[in-house]
C-alpha cells in the first residue's frame, strides 16, 4: 500500500491511495495489478480503477500510470 498527496502551496488538490491486489498466480510474473482511488477534495470526487505495473520499474512510474489512467 502507498499513498501520494498532491499539494499546491500547502493546499491538498489530490490524493492517491493504492494497493497491490495481485493474485498469487499472477505473482509468478513480474507484472502486478494495483487498485487505486484518487480523491479530489475540492469536489469530493473519487476516481477508482486498476492498473498493471512491471515491478522492475519504479514507484514513480506506477504513479505516472495511475495519473494517466484517471479521466478527469
Image: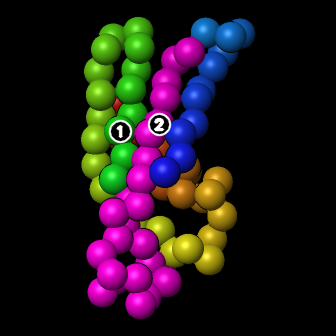
Q: Is residue 18 left or right of residue 10?
A: left
Q: Which residue is drawn at the image coordinates 66% and 15% (left, top)? A: 8
Residue 28: in magenta span? yes
Crowding around mark 1 (Cα neighbors within 10 Å: few <14, some 14 to 19, many 20+) is some
Q: Quadrant for residue 28, please give it.
A: bottom left
Residue 20: in magenta span? yes
Q: Is residue 50 left or right of residue 10?
A: left
Q: Which residue is drawn at the image coordinates 29% and 21% (left, top)? A: 45
Which of 13 and 29 lies nearest the eye of the viewer?
Answer: 29
Kindly indicate whether the residue at mark 2 contacts the one at mark 1 (C-beta within 8 angstroms): yes
Residue 54, compared with residue 7, is above or below; it is below
Instruction: State the CA–CA distance, disc 1 to disc 2.
Output: 6 Å
Q: Which residue is drawn at the image coordinates 49% and 24% (left, top)? A: 14
Magenta residues (range): 12-34
In the picture of the structure, the residue carrying the numbered disc 2 is 16
The reply to whether residue 51 is in sight is: no
Secondary element type, mark 2: strand
Which of 63 and 3 lies nearest the eye of the viewer?
Answer: 3
Q: Which residue is drawn at the image coordinates 29% and 28% (left, top)? A: 46
Residue 32, compared with residue 67, is above or below; it is below
Amino acid at each position: 500500500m502507498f499513498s501520494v498527496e498532491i499539494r499546491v502551496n500547502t493546499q491538498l488538490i489530490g490524493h492517491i491511495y493504492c494497493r497491490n491486489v495481485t493474485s498469487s498466480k499472477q505473482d509468478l510474473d513480474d507484472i502486478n495489478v494495483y487498485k487505486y482511488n484518487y480523491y479530489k477534495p475540492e469536489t469530493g470526487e473519487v476516481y477508482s480503477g486498476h492498473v498493471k505495473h512491471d515491478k522492475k520499474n519504479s514507484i514513480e512510474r506506477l504513479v505516472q500510470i495511475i495519473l494517466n489512467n484517471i479521466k478527469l
